[in-house]
Image (cartoon, rainbow, N blue to C red):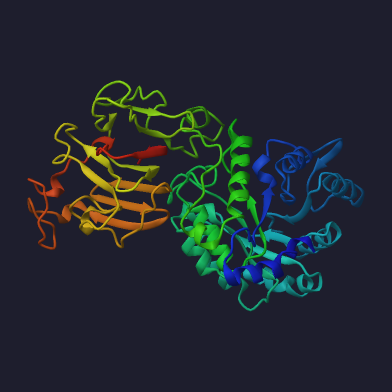
C-alpha cells in the first residue's frame, strides 16, 4: 500500500538521522480549494505533484458529473470519481470531517469507505459512537481519526481526543490539526509530543499568531514552527499523510499552497538536526506581501487577519540616516548598503509607532556581527536610553548581551550558537509589560518590564546601563533595526498590532 510504503525505509533512516529521509507524505485537503469543483481540485493536486487527497462532504463534483461529493453518492458516480482521480495520479486516501447522526448513517459511511478504498475517515464523533463502530472498523482495516477544531470545540484540546479513543485499538487515532491547536493557544510542536503514537494524519498549517483566529500563511513564514513540527514527526517515526489545509481564501491561495509544497519538498531532504535548526528558506516568499494580504482580499479576510510588512519595499515608511543607507535586494533581503566610501549607515526606523504587537523576521549575521531589533523607541537619537533592544550578537560576551537577550537587562534562557551566513527566525511579542522572544521556534526570553523598578539595576541586583527604571520605558514607539558597523541582513519582516 502506497500510504505506508516508506515505513521500513523511514525506520532504518531514523536510526542515523541522515538527510533526504522523510517519513511524512504530503497530501491536500480538498477544503483548501472549496471554491472549485472536486474535479478542478484533482487538477490542482496533480499540478502540485500531490498524490494523496482528503475529500470532504459537499463539494460540487464538476467535470460533467452532477451532484456533490458525498458518502451517499451512487456506485456509478463513485466509479467515475475514482477513475478521474486515477487519471490524475491522485488517490482519495481520506474523507472528512464527517460525523454521522446515527448508527444507520455510520453503516452507510463505512460501506462507502470500503467501496472507495479509503484508508481513513476523519470525524468528531463522541466516544460512545466510536466504541459502537469499532468491530466494523477493524474488520475493514480502516482508520478512524478524531479532528480538532479550535476552542470551544469539544476536541480542541488533545487530552479529550486521547480519552475518547482510549482502549479502542490501533485503528483509532487523531487527525491532528496543528493550525487549530495554535488558534486555541497551544504550541503545535509540544502538542505533537503529547499525542505521540496516536496520530493517523494531520491538517498541517502555519498561522500568523497563536491564541486567536489568525489566518493561514505559507509554511515557514508564520509562528507555528513548521520545521519543528516536521522534526517532531520524524522523531516519532510518523508514516502517514500531512494534508495542506487552508482556511483563508484569497486570490493568492494557489501561490500560497505552491509555497507550502515547495517548503515541504525542501524539508524532506533535510536531516533531523537541520529541521530542528530551521534550516529552510521559505520558497518564493516576497518581502512585499501587500498584494497578497491587503484588506479586502478574500471574503473572510476580516476573520483571518494578516501580518503586514514592517517596511515597504521602497522604504517609504522608514527613516534612516540618508536616502539609500538601507535597501532591499531583488531577492527581498534588507541590509545596510555597504558601498565603499559611503557615509555611516546608521539605524533603520519605522515612521509609525507601535504599542502592543508581534514581529516576525529573519536575520543573517556574519562573523562577529553585532545588531539588534529596537522596540517602542521614544527617541531614535538617544535610542540607548529610550528603546528596548532585542540583541543579535555572537561570541563570549556577557549573557545579557547575546542573541535573544533583552539588552543589558535579561539574558536568554540559554546561549544559542549563531552560525555565520545562516538565517535565523525571530518572533518578538510586546504586550503591555510583557516582552517575549522566540528564536527558531524556541522561547528564549520572557520578561515583565514592571519588575525593573530601580534605575541602573536589574531585579537580581546586577547593574545595567539605564539611567531610568526599565519599567519606565515607553509602552509605544518606533521599531528599528540596528547597524553596528558590521554586516547584518534581514528578510520576511512582518508586524501585526495586537
As drawn, the residue found furthest toward the bottom would be: 167
Q: Is 424 placed above or below 173 here?
A: above
Q: Is residue 257 left or right of residue 186?
A: right
Image quadrant in which you'd find residue 445: bottom left
Nearer-the-camera pick, 225 or 125: 225
Nearer-the-camera pick, 67 or 250: 250
Q: Is residue 53 left or right of residue 254?
A: right
As drawn, the residue found furthest toward the right would be: 76
Nearer-the-camera pick, 498 or 112: 498
The percent position of residue 327, horizontal first and vertical second, equals 37, 27
For image coordinates 26% across by 51% down, the residue present is 434
Nearer-the-camera pick, 308 or 126: 308
Q: Is residue 283 left or right of residue 41?
A: left
The percent position of residue 355, horizontal first and vertical second, equals 27, 38
Residue 369 appears in the figure: yes
The percent position of residue 205, horizontal first and vertical second, equals 55, 50
Identify the image quadrant of the N terminus.
bottom right
Q: Is 466 placed above or below 445 here?
A: above
The percent position of residue 90, horizontal first and vertical second, equals 79, 49
Amino acid at each position: 500500500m502506497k500510504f505506508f510504503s516508506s515505513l521500513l525505509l523511514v525506520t532504518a533512516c531514523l536510526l542515523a538521522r541522515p538527510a533526504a529521509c522523510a517519513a511524512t507524505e504530503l497530501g491536500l485537503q480538498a477544503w483548501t480549494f472549496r471554491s472549485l469543483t472536486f474535479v478542478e481540485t484533482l487538477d490542482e493536486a496533480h499540478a502540485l505533484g500531490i498524490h494523496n487527497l482528503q475529500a470532504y462532504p459537499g463539494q460540487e463534483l464538476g467535470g460533467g458529473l452532477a451532484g456533490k461529493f458525498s458518502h451517499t453518492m451512487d456506485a456509478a458516480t463513485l466509479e467515475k470519481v475514482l477513475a478521474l482521480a486515477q487519471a490524475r495520479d491522485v488517490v482519495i486516501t481520506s474523507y472528512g470531517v464527517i460525523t454521522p447522526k446515527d448508527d444507520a448513517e455510520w453503516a452507510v459511511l463505512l460501506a462507502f469507505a470500503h467501496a472507495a478504498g479509503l484508508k481513513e475517515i476523519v470525524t468528531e464523533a463522541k466516544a460512545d459512537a466510536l466504541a459502537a463502530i469499532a468491530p466494523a472498523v477493524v474488520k475493514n482495516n480502516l482508520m478512524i481519526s478524531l479532528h480538532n477544531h479550535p476552542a470551544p470545540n469539544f476536541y480542541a484540546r488533545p487530552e479529550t481526543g486521547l480519552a475518547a479513543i482510549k482502549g479502542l485499538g490501533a485503528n483509532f487515532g487523531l487527525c491532528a490539526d496543528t493550525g487549530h491547536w495554535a488558534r486555541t493557544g497551544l504550541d503545535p510542536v509540544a502538542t505533537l509530543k503529547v499525542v505521540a503514537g496516536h496520530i493517523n494524519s494531520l491538517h498541517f498549517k502555519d498561522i500568523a499568531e497563536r491564541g486567536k483566529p489568525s489566518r493561514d500563511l505559507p509554511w515557514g513564514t508564520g509562528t507555528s514552527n513548521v520545521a519543528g513540527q516536521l522534526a517532531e514527526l520524524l522523531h516519532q517515526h510518523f508514516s502517514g499523510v500531512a494534508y495542506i489545509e487552508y482556511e483563508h481564501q484569497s486570490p493568492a491561495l494557489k501561490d500560497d499552497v505552491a509555497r507550502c509544497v515547495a517548503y515541504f519538498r525542501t524539508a524532506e531532504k533535510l536531516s533531523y538536526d537541520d529541521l530542528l535548526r530551521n534550516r529552510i528558506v521559505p520558497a518564493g516568499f516576497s518581502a512585499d506581501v501587500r498584494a497578497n494580504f491587503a484588506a479586502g482580499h478574500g471574503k473572510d479576510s476580516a476573520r483571518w487577519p494578516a501580518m503586514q510588512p514592517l517596511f515597504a519595499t521602497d522604504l517609504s515608511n522608514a527613516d534612516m540616516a540618508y536616502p539609500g543607507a538601507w535597501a532591499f535586494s531583488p531577492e527581498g533581503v534588507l541590509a545596510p548598503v555597504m558601498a565603499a566610501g559611503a557615509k555611516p549607515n546608521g539605524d533603520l526606523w519605522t515612521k509609525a509607532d507601535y504599542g502592543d504587537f508581534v514581529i516576525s523576521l529573519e536575520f543573517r549575521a556574519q562573523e562577529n556581527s553585532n545588531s539588534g531589533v529596537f522596540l517602542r523607541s521614544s527617541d531614535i537619537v538617544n535610542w540607548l536610553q529610550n528603546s528596548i533592544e532585542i540583541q543579535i550578537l555572537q561570541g563570549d560576551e556577557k549573557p545579557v548581551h547575546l542573541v535573544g537577550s533583552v539588552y543589558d537587562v535579561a539574558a536568554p534562557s540559554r546561549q544559542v550558537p549563531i552560525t555565520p551566513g545562516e538565517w535565523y527566525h525571530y518572533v518578538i511579542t510586546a504586550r503591555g509589560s510583557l516582552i517575549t522572544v522566540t528564536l527558531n521556534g524556541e522561547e528564549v526570553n520572557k520578561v515583565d518590564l514592571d519588575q525593573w523598578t530601580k534605575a541602573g539595576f536589574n531585579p537580581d541586583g546586577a547593574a545595567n546601563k539605564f539611567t531610568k527604571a526599565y519599567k519606565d520605558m515607553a509602552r509605544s514607539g518606533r521599531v528599528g533595526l540596528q547597524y553596528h558597523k558590521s554586516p547584518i541582513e534581514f528578510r520576511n519582516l512582518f508586524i501585526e498590532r495586537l
